[in-house]
Image (spheres, rainbow, N blue to C red):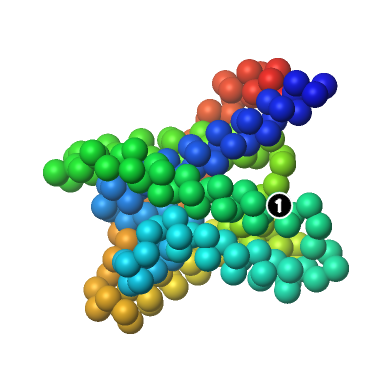
C-alpha cells in the first residue's frame, strides 16, 4: 500500500513535468501557446521575467480566486496547490532550458513541434487526472467555477480557456502593441488535447492502474 502511495505521488510529479514540457514546446513552436500558459507567456514578455516566475504569481492569483469563490466549500487539501503550483512553475523554466535547442525554421516544422507539444500535454494531463492528488491551480480555478455554478467541469473549461485567451490578447495589445502568444496553435491545442487524452487513456489505463 505504501509503495503504491509513493508511486501515485511520483507519477503526479511526472505529470507536472510533462505538462510543463508540453507547454514549453508550444512556446517554442511559436504558433500560439496553450490556453494554460497564454497569460503567463504574455506577462513574461511584458515584464521580462521568466515564464516560470510569472506562472508562479498567476497560480497564486488563481488559488486566492478559488478561496474567494468557494469560501467554506474550499477543501483545505487544495492548499497543496501552492506547493504543486510552485513545482510546476519551476518545471516550466527547467523545461524551457531543456528545449532551448528547438527552433523550428519553417511552418511545417512549427506545426510538428506544436503537435508534439499537444501529445506531451495530453499525457501529462492523463497522469494528473489518474493520480487524483490535487488540482493544478488552473484546473482548480475551473473546478471552483463549475462547483459554484453547479455545472460540469468539461462544460465550464472551454469558456474559462476562451476567457484566458481573450485576456492574453488584450494584455498583448495593451502593453506590447502587437498580438503575442495567441495564434492558430492556441486553437489547435484547445481542440485536440482532450481527444488525445481519451485516446491515450484506452491503452495506458491498465498500466497506470497497476502502479497506483
- Residue 139 image offset from top left, x and y in percent: 62, 54
Residue identifier under label 1? 80
Q: Is residue 99 visible?
A: yes
Residue that protrudes farthest toward the left in the picture: 105
Viewport quadrant of the N terminus: top right
Q: Which of 179 and 92 is in front in this view?
A: 92
Q: Is residue 145 visible?
A: no
Q: Which of 147 and 12 is in front in this view?
A: 12
Q: Nearer the viewer, residue 90 or 32?
A: 90
Viewport quadrant of the C terminus: top right
- Residue 178 image offset from top left, x and y in percent: 24, 73
Residue drawn at 75 percent across, 21 percent down:
3
- Residue 80 image offset from top left, x and y in percent: 71, 52
Neighbor class of circle 1 (other Cα within 10 Å; few <14, some 14-19, many 20+) is some
**Up/down of 63 relative to 200, above or below:** below
**Up/down of 99 relative to 178, above or below:** above
Q: Quadrant of residue 158?
A: bottom right
Q: In which quarter of the image is residue 187?
A: bottom left
- Residue 133 image offset from top left, x and y in percent: 72, 41
Residue that protrudes farthest toward the bottom in the picture: 174
Residue drawn at 65 percent across, 64 percent down:
63
Task: Give the left or right position of residue 172, taking residue 143 as reference.
Answer: left
Residue drawn at 70 percent across, 18 percent down:
210
**Up/down of 116 relative to 136, above or below:** above
Q: Nearer the viewer, residue 196 or 51?
A: 51
Q: Mark 1: which secondary structure?
A: helix
Amino acid at each position: 500500500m505504501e509503495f503504491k502511495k509513493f508511486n501515485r505521488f511520483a507519477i503526479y510529479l511526472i505529470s507536472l513535468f510533462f505538462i510543463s514540457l508540453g507547454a514549453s514546446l508550444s512556446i517554442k513552436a511559436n504558433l500560439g501557446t496553450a490556453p494554460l500558459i497564454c497569460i503567463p507567456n504574455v506577462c513574461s514578455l511584458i515584464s521580462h521575467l521568466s515564464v516560470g516566475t510569472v506562472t508562479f504569481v498567476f497560480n497564486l492569483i488563481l488559488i486566492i480566486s478559488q478561496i474567494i469563490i468557494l469560501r467554506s466549500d474550499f477543501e483545505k487539501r487544495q492548499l497543496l496547490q501552492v506547493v504543486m503550483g510552485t513545482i510546476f512553475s519551476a518545471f516550466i523554466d527547467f523545461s524551457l532550458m531543456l528545449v532551448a535547442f528547438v527552433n523550428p525554421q519553417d511552418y511545417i516544422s512549427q506545426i510538428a513541434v506544436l503537435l508534439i507539444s499537444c501529445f506531451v500535454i495530453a499525457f501529462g494531463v492523463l497522469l494528473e487526472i489518474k493520480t487524483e492528488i490535487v488540482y493544478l491551480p488552473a484546473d482548480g480555478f475551473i473546478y471552483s467555477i463549475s462547483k459554484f455554478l453547479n455545472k460540469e467541469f468539461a462544460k465550464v473549461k472551454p469558456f474559462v480557456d476562451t476567457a484566458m485567451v481573450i485576456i492574453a490578447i488584450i494584455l498583448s495589445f495593451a502593453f506590447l502593441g502587437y498580438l503575442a502568444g495567441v495564434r492558430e496553435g492556441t486553437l489547435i491545442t484547445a481542440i485536440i488535447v482532450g481527444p488525445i487524452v481519451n485516446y491515450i487513456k484506452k491503452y495506458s489505463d491498465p498500466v497506470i492502474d497497476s502502479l497506483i
